[in-house]
């Protein structure tokens, strides 16, 4: 099973961002290192959600996404994947998420705030479907 490793502080920052952004979905880019089996998140890069209905979907402006990716590459890091929240929905990719996924081999992390306790899952996009990743929260270095 593919794995996404995420530091405790980055997880905590993502959860805080999701709570602050509710009831709208929040989104951004994850940076770090990746190989075929394991993606290692080092930093998160928040982006503005420019979707027409941000309560139920997310969209990163193309120019902002390009700027974030250039910043990540300039820091000698890779785009590991993307993240967004589901303030009222499950921590699973929606049909819209699958429809809009465009980066095969990248992680798509979802933070659900539904049902009390927040839940964090991650999914690797194959180009055709999402495959569940094992999420491992690791101590900060």
Image (spheres, rainbow, N blue to C red):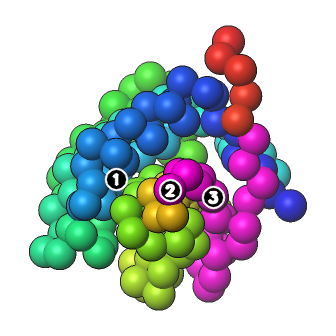
Position above or below: 84 against 130: above
Along the polypeptide, which appears first: circle 1 or circle 2?
A: 1
Query: Which residue carries the number 1 mark?
Result: 27
- Residue at 47 percent across and 64 percent down: it is 114
Measured as percent of width and height from the top left, residue 6 is found at 64, 36
Alpha-carbon span between mark 3 and mark 1: 14 Å
Does the segment drawn in magenta span residue 140?
A: no
Mainly helix, strand or loop, the magenta region?
A: strand
- Image quarter where the N terminus lies is bottom right
Query: Which residue carries the number 3 mark?
Result: 122
Q: Residue furthest top?
A: 141
Q: Residues within 10 Å of mark 3 (few under 14, many from 20)?
A: many
**Closer-to-camera residue (50/72):** 50
Measured as percent of width and height from the top left, residue 67 is found at 25, 41
Measured as percent of width and height from the top left, residue 85 is found at 41, 58
Span shown in magenta: 116-136
Query: Which residue carries the number 2 mark?
Result: 116
**Closer-to-camera residue (121/124):** 121
- Residue 13, by quadrant, is top left
Q: Which element type, helix, strand or loop, lies under badge 2?
A: loop
- Image quarter where the C terminus lies is top right
Alpha-carbon span between mark 1 and mark 2: 20 Å
Q: Residue furthest right?
A: 1
């Amino acid at each position: 099973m593919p794995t996404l490793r995420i530091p405790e502080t980055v997880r905590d920052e993502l959860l805080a961002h999701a709570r602050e952004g509710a009831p709208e979905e929040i989104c951004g880019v994850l940076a770090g290192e990746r190989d075929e089996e394991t993606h290692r998140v080092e930093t998160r890069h928040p982006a503005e959600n420019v979707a027409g209905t941000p309560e139920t979907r997310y969209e990163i402006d193309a120019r902002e996404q390009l700027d974030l990716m250039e910043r990540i590459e300039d820091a000698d890091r890779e785009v590991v994947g993307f993240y967004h929240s589901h303030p009222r929905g499950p921590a699973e990719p929606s049909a819209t998420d699958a429809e809009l996924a465009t980066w095969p081999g990248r992680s798509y992390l979802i933070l659900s705030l539904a049902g009390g306790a927040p839940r964090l899952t991650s999914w690797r996009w194959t180009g055709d479907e999402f495959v569940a990743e094992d999420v491992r929260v690791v101590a900060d270095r």
